[in-house]
Image (cartoon, rainbow, N blue to C red):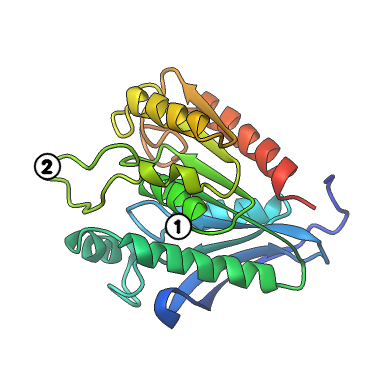
């Protein structure tokens, strides 16, 4: 796409129509040029609609995409801090799958209606959001989806974990778009054998996907604020994302 001379961008908190017609909070970041631009829905991790998730949303705008991060915990705790909202969501077993799909559908509709949109939209999610990115791509017509170490696609969460979600691998046959998966070899959720199983299921279903697993990286290797951050894996992972979206969403 190249770098346009005019590189201004803006970011702001907006309201979008989510699942069931609910008005929910979302963070929008976009280049200020005329476009056309592809759209990206950033699905935040379990800790919530936080500074890191907003930073990632701005990063997509800086790379020429219309990007939106819906606050998936908004109903549990409107106006609360991300930590408190995430705690309230955990207490309820996490975000229900049908509500997630409805909120992502609302975010996609918002992006596609923007004047600078090229009509294409994809998702990316980290941790619980990785599972939700896969779920959204199996439930909605999308153009690209990225799953960053999404757990519990193949198996359920272990006993004692607050997340009340079930496996969704049976939805693989409905995947609407190519899927990029980025995983750590040292991760337990998802473990490498679960990644291999999902790879096999998608191959058997004839669904275009590319998975990359990084040696020496565990869960949350993209997260710059945690000890789990692995610069080499993260830098390569971001390049894989730019290449993937560049082919499927850009321009």
Counting from the top left corner in percent of width and height, residue 130 is at 43, 45
Which residue is more in the foreground, 67 or 176? 176
> Between tags 1 and 2, which lies in front?
2
Q: Name the residue under label 2.
A: 159
10 versus 229 height, above or below: below
Q: Mark 1 points at which residue?
A: 51
Number of the label disc, if any, that sits on residue 2: none
Classify 10 Å Cα crowding around label 1: few (below 14), some (14-19), many (20 and above): few
Counting from the top left corner in percent of width and height, residue 173 is at 47, 43
100 versus 130 height, above or below: below
Counting from the top left corner in percent of width and height, residue 154 is at 32, 37
Spatial CA span between label 1 and label 2: 30 Å
Q: Residue at x 54, y 43 (%)?
A: 146
Which residue is more in the foreground, 111 or 15? 111
Q: Residue at x 56, y 37 (%)?
A: 207
Does residue 31 appear left or right of residue 208 in this picture?
right
Q: Residue at x 41, y 59 (%)?
A: 50
N-terminal-most mark, 1 or 2? 1
């Amino acid at each position: 796409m190249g770098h346009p001379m005019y590189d201004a961008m803006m970011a702001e908190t907006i309201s979008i129509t989510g699942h069931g017609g609910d008005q929910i909070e979302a963070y929008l970041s976009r280049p200020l040029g005329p476009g056309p631009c592809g759209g990206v829905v950033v699905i935040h991790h379990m800790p919530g609609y936080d500074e890191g998730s907003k930073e990632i949303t701005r990063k997509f705008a800086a790379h020429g995409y219309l990007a939106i991060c819906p606050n998936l915990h908004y109903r549990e705790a409107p106006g609360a801090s991300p930590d408190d909202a995430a705690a309230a969501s955990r207490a309820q077993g996490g975000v229900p799958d049908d509500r997630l799909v409805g909120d992502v559908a609302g975010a996609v509709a918002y992006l596609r209606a923007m004047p600078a949109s090229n009509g294409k939209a994809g998702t990316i999610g980290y941790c619980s959001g990785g599972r939700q990115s896969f779920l959204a791509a199996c439930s909605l017509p999308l153009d690209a989806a990225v799953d960053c170490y999404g757990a519990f696609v193949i198996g359920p969460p272990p006993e004692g974990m607050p997340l009340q979600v079930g496996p969704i691998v049976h939805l693989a046959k409905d995947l609407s778009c190519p899927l990029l998966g980025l995983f750590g070899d040292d991760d337990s959720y998802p473990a490498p054998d679960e990644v291999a199983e999902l790879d096999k299921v998608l191959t058997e279903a004839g669904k275009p996907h590319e998975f990359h697993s990084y040696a020496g990286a565990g869960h949350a290797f993209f997260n710059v604020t945690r000890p789990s951050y692995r610069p080499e894996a993260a830098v390569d992972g971001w390049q894989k994302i730019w290449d993937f979206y560049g082919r499927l969403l850009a321009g």
